[in-house]
Image (cartoon, rainbow, N blue to C red):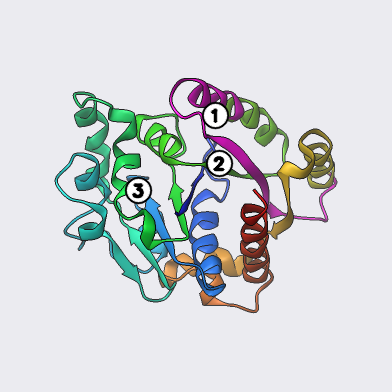
Amino acid sequence: MAKIFAIANQKGGVGKTTTAVNLAAALAKLGQRVLLIDLDPQGNATMGSGIDKRSIRRSVYQVLIGMSDIAEARVRSEAGGYDVLPANRELAGAEIELVDFEERETRLKDAIHAVDADYDFVLIDAPPALSLLTLNGLCAAHGVVIPMQCEYYALEGLSDLVATIKTVHANLNTNLKVIGLLRVMYDPRMTLSQQVSAQLEQHFGDKVFKAVIPRNIRLAEAPSHGLPGVIFDPESKGAKAYVEFGAEMIRRISAL
């Protein structure tokens, strides 16, 4: 049975999609069968995996409204070595259409169930807002991975996100829990980064992943080439950090 994780943060620009794409590629490199679900209408995880969102015939949108299943809509990321359930701007309309569906929060969960045996990991790149799409991601997931920068505003947003996860756990998905916090875009030269990192370890203990993703230009360049950073420049500090993170995820999940 696949382990399903939402990569979520209500704050935008925190490296959420970068984390989803590179974790998928890192896990694939480590021999895992991976499905990456792009739940963001911007389709950045789709493009970052080397798939042209403008040319796809079926996407997560058709899956959510019942016009397709995942097996028909998934596309192979040849560069990354994993499957992608792609997204494009059509997905923005799903918010309105889903309102009329029964059990609208669990549409994605039900769809994943049909391909559950095909994968070891299913990663969901959730949009940076508490929407019906995000709720579908959280209802489908066993746990949440929270990428966050070590800065003051990130701490403020974290408390909101944890509150949201608790609400979803209480009302919609009793299996949902925070798997861990991943420090991203980390700059050890900044005193504030060190202070916030220390605060996270103090308050969240072993919920903070040991792997730390540094601020790295090669990770930022990779999407323009349609490649995960892990594939674009395997020797870069950022790529090595994501492979280390993938290995830590495998260890952490096997211990659960």
Any magenta on residue 7?
A: no
Is residue 115 found left or right of 254 in the rendered image? left
Q: Residues within 10 Å of mark 3 (few under 14, many from 20)?
A: some
Label 3 – label 1 distance at C-alpha: 23 Å
Residues marked 1 and 2 touching at CB (< 8 Å): yes
Q: Which residue is mark 1?
A: 165
Dot 1 lies on which element?
A: helix
Q: Position of residue 131 (x, y in %)?
A: 38, 29
Residue 197: quadrant of the picture: top right
Instruction: Where is residue 196? Give x, y as percent.
Output: 79, 40
Residue 144: give its label.
2
Tag on residue 220?
Answer: none
Q: Are marks 3 and 1 in contact (CB under 8 Å)?
A: no
Tag 2: Cα neighbours inside 10 Å, few (<14), some, or many (≥20)? many
Q: Nearer the viewer, residue 238 or 220?
A: 238
Residue appearing at x 42%, y 61% in the figure: 119
The circle drawn on residue 42 is 3
Q: In front here: 157 or 20?
A: 20
Task: Determine whether, in the image, residue 202 is placed left or right of residue 53.
Answer: right
Element carrying mark 2: strand
Q: Position of residue 181 (x, y in %)?
A: 67, 44
Compare marks 3 and 1 and give the one earlier in the sequence: 3
- Whether residues under marks 2 and 3 lie with C-beta atoms below 8 angstroms apart, the answer is no
Q: Earlier in the sequence, mark 1 or mark 2?
A: 2
Residues drawn in magenta: 162-191
Q: Residue at x 52, y 75 (%)?
A: 231
Q: At x 16% / y 59%, what residue is drawn?
A: 57
**Secondary structure of residue under mark 3:** loop
* Quarter location, residue 50: bottom left
